[in-house]
Image (cartoon, rainbow, N blue to C red):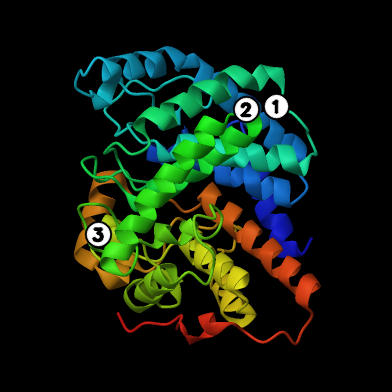
Amino acid sequence: MTSGLERSVAAILRAQHAEGAFVASPDFAQYRYCWLRDGSFTAYSLDRAGEVGAAERFHMWCAAAVSGVAGLISRAIERKAAGEPIEPSAMPPARFSLEGTAVNDDWPNFQVDGYGTWLWSLHQHLQKVDEQSLPAELLPAVRSTAAYLSEFGTTPCFDVWEEDGASVHTSTLGCVYAGLRAAAAMLGEAELEHRAAQVRELLLGQARATGRFRKSDRSPSVDASLLWLCEPFHVVDPDDPFYNETVREISARLVFEGGARRYPEDTYYGGGSWPVLTASLGWYYASAGDRAAATRCRDWVAAHFDEKGRLAEQFGGEKRDPAHYSQWVDRWGPPAADLVWSHAMYVVLEFELDAYARATGPTKPSSNASSITTSSPN
């Protein structure tokens, strides 16, 4: 591994709790927990880096954490079947303590994306280690999670940014689709594959109606998390016309000083550019055959490590929107200076670029993705 990769992999391993969880950020009080979503992407990055033992410890931690809230999942499914209203506070959590217990506070926990992302990441891990069948100790948690996604995967819930609990979010549906497909493969249940196909058709139907993928069923805006519909969740291929139109919109409206922002209306710490999303954009470019654009994304992320080897959650918000940046600093202090998920996505992009180079050599021409700019005046 290059020194940059070694630095990020080491940062991730330092952030792993003894039980297997990954703390979202070691230096930001609000993030001293483990999110299923962040952790699952992080475990995937470790699999790419060959740290399969650490990834396995995370998945075992996840299985224990999910088993600990299996009663919440069962009761939620029973309430839905009885036609009772959904109480977000009674749903299984999106984040856990590092010991794997549910956190009893007012955090917006009703988010299904993390559960789908975990099943996807677990399946990727099992393929990486050439495990032919699902280990017995993981079976109950996988079954419980699959049932939860089947019942609530298309229900309005909080988005990946934990800001809107009243909508059905497109990137969440992508996570659900990938999770259901992974569960179908691990459990050998055709009904889960059928449910995944229904979720995909819902996604494609919305795109057909509008010409591109939208942020949610209630918002026509764009969101950089929509990038995941191609990589890694494979709802669509890189040449899908609706997806390409979505990427063009992301490039035109969300790229700020070379990095990708979350969505146009973002005011969190000024709505700066995120390494997580810039690496996601690079991942797409690599899959679409545009090595130059993918490399620019990688280089932007690499340039934002600080002298201590930390990689923050976002950059540039204090410049783009100083008023909102200051409001968040007054509320929570400075933004996270080291986000484990940022390291993880940098690692993934480095390996994507390496795989692309080994597979194609130096002269393969770029695809039509090269027409999508990676700079923006906003």
Dividing the picture into quarters, in which one does residue 13 lie?
top right
Q: Amino acid at mark 2?
A: Leu
- Residue at 60% x, 25% y is 61
- Residue at 20% x, 52% y is 218
User: Do the numbered discs 1 and 2 sit on residues whose CB atoms are within 8 Å?
Assistant: yes
- Residue at 74% x, 51% y is 49
Q: Position of residue 250 (x, y in %)?
A: 37, 71
Is residue 315 in view?
A: yes
Relative to 132, is 1 above or below? below
Is residue 334 in view?
A: no
Q: Which residue position is annotated with label 3?
A: 267
The mark nearer the N terminus, 2 or 3, is 2
**216 sits to left or right of 11:** left
User: Do the numbered discs 1 and 3 sit on residues whose CB atoms are within 8 Å?
Assistant: no
Mark 1 or mark 3, whichever is nearer to me: 1
Q: Position of residue 206 (x, y in %)?
A: 30, 57
Disc 1: CA contacts within 10 A as few (<14), some (14-19) or many (>=20): some
Q: Amino acid at mark 3?
A: Thr
User: Do the numbered discs 2 and 3 sit on residues whose CB atoms are within 8 Å?
Assistant: no
The mark nearer the N terminus, 1 or 2, is 1
**276 sits to left or right of 218:** right
Q: Element type at marker 2?
A: helix
Residue 195's tag is: none
Q: Which residue position is annotated with label 1?
A: 134
Disc 2: CA contacts within 10 A as few (<14), some (14-19) or many (>=20): some
Q: Which residue position is annotated with label 2?
A: 187
Q: Quadrant of the N terminus?
A: bottom right
